[in-house]
Image (spheres, rainbow, N blue to C red):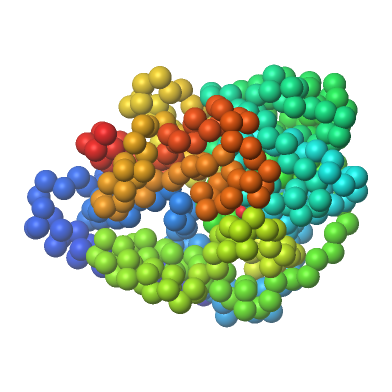
């Protein structure tokens, strides 16, 4: 009830504020493109558009977080944890963790593999996948990818399988179903390996939900981090056929408090970025180290960070359930944006609600910088075969030249946002064309 009243007041305030801004804006620039339909109300297209920065956060998420800040008794435990598990995969076992990295670390740990056993992963990935492997004293073996879906190439996979190979991690990059998923399943079966399907970027529900097409010894790995398709700022899960028993400590109340501030702060920053207020607040928060980083300094140095290896708090489950409530709308929007990009970038025919839209361009860094000047922030997953670029590849066992396709694609890749309106997507395309 209180949430509804707060929502109403905030909507009203936003309406008046944006109406005023819109009138002022239209006096200044009569030619400016305006958003149609529900999103109009004088709002102009000058708002920040970002692939990375809080892509899912809406007013209701921000308000829910604010409400939770006043209810610390719901932060660590509560009924929502079990509710979330049922909503995610009702017929399977869902184990929740503070991060996807932590989920992978514990999943591998429960397998009790001999030291230096090989875990096959694709190049064109991120440290969050590699560091849990190394932290378990296991070896990451990199497999090259195919160009169509930026996913593991089964021929390359088979070439890399040796006597110490135990697990294959199949990444659904950008939420694309791997082009040769069935072939990879066959290779995994043939060599009697364990399969972990990494659906941290999202997935095609019909294909994943169909457990008949799954192989026996398989798991799903999920992430609910801030830049994923559904987000509780931090979060991860393992979905398994048999229950896993892993007991972890909860993050501190201070950690949860800081994470709960993320949604309202980023929502406000995005809304006020172009009038510089958001920009200034963001700079100050970064300077004060106030927002908990997505990747810690320790991780950038190539070490697994147990600071993010904790249990999943109930407050985050509440935030995630709210995102799941509106997932189908968000997914429809993402799919529509993907179709629009396909229309403009001929030759591309991606399908479904991708987390990000991949595009290959020659002078990637210059283009990203040029668009940033116009408040359009494109993503760069993955600008290095194991991202981020600050990571030393020797440290994570990648030898240059090992996976040439992944190396080539990581030099050219940019990611366009998909969780935006069609008018905003058109603006992204137009601005991109202007600077290309
Ligand atoms: C492909 C992939 N798998 C797993 C993860 C781990 O997710 P988390 O950030 O929740 O640790 C990430 C993180 O970005 C990822 O990109």
Residue 333 visible in the shown view: no
**Left or right, 231 with reference to 46:** right
What residue is at 69 percent from the left and 19 percent from the top? 155
264 in relation to 303, above or below: below
Q: How many marks?
A: 0
What residue is at 87 percent from the left and 51 percent from the top? 110
358 in relation to 65, above or below: above
**Left or right, 433 with reference to 393:** left
Residue 146, given in percent of the width and then of the height, sits at: 58, 24
Name the image quarter holding the C terminus: top left
Residue 431 visible in the shown view: yes
Q: Which image quarter: residue 281? A: bottom left
263 in relation to 410, above or below: below
Residue 156, given in percent of the width and then of the height, sits at: 68, 23
What residue is at 55 percent from the left and 46 percent from the top? 387
Residue 229, given in percent of the width and then of the height, sits at: 55, 47
What residue is at 62 percent from the left and 74 percent from the top? 255
**Of residues 362 and 357, which is closer to you in this image?**
362
Residue 269, given in percent of the width and then of the height, sits at: 37, 65
**Left or right, 205 with reference to 273:** right
Q: Which image quarter: residue 194? A: top right
């Amino acid at each position: 009830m209180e949430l509804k009243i707060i929502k109403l007041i905030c909507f009203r305030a936003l309406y008046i504020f944006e109406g005023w801004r819109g009138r002022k804006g239209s006096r200044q620039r009569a030619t400016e493109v305006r958003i149609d339909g529900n999103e109009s109300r004088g709002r102009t297209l000058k708002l920040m558009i970002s692939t990375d920065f809080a892509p899912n956060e809406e007013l209701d998420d921000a308000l829910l977080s604010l409400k939770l800040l006043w209810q610390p008794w719901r932060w660590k435990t509560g009924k929502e944890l079990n509710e979330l598990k049922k909503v995610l995969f009702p017929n399977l076992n869902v184990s929740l963790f503070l991060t996807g990295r932590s989920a992978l670390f514990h999943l591998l740990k429960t397998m009790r593999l001999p030291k230096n056993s090989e875990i096959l992963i694709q190049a064109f990935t991120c440290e969050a996948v590699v560091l849990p492997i190394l932290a378990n004293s296991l070896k990451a073996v990199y497999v090259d990818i195919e160009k169509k879906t930026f996913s593991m190439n089964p021929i390359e996979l088979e070439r890399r399988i040796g006597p110490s190979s135990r697990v294959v991690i199949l990444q659904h990059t950008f939420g694309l179903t791997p082009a040769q998923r069935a072939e990879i399943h066959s290779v995994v079966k043939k060599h009697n390996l364990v399969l972990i399907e990494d659906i941290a970027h999202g997935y095609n529900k019909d294909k994943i939900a169909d457990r008949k097409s799954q192989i026996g010894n398989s798991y799903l790995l999920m992430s609910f981090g801030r830049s994923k398709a559904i987000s509780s700022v931090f979060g991860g899960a393992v979905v398994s056929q048999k229950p896993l028993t892993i007991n972890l400590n909860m993050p501190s109340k201070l950690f949860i408090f800081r994470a709960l501030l993320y949604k309202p702060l980023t929502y406000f920053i995005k809304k006020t970025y172009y009038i510089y207020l958001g920009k200034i607040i963001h700079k100050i928060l970064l300077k004060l180290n106030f927002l908990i980083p997505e990747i810690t300094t320790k991780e950038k140095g190539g070490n697994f960070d147990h600071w993010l290896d904790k249990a999943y708090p109930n407050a985050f489950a509440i935030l995630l359930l709210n995102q799941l409530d509106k997932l189908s709308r968000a997914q429809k929007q993402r799919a529509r944006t993907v179709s629009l990009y396909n229309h403009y970038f001929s030759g591309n025919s991606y399908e479904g609600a991708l987390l990000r839209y991949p595009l290959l361009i020659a002078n990637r860094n210059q283009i990203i910088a040029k668009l940033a000047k116009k408040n359009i922030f494109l993503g760069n997953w993955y600008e290095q075969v194991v991202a981020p670029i600050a990571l030393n590849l020797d440290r994570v066992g990648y030898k240059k030249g090992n996976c040439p396709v992944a190396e080539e694609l990581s030099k050219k890749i940019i990611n366009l946002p998909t969780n935006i309106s069609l008018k905003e997507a058109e603006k992204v395309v137009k601005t991109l064309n202007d600077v290309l």
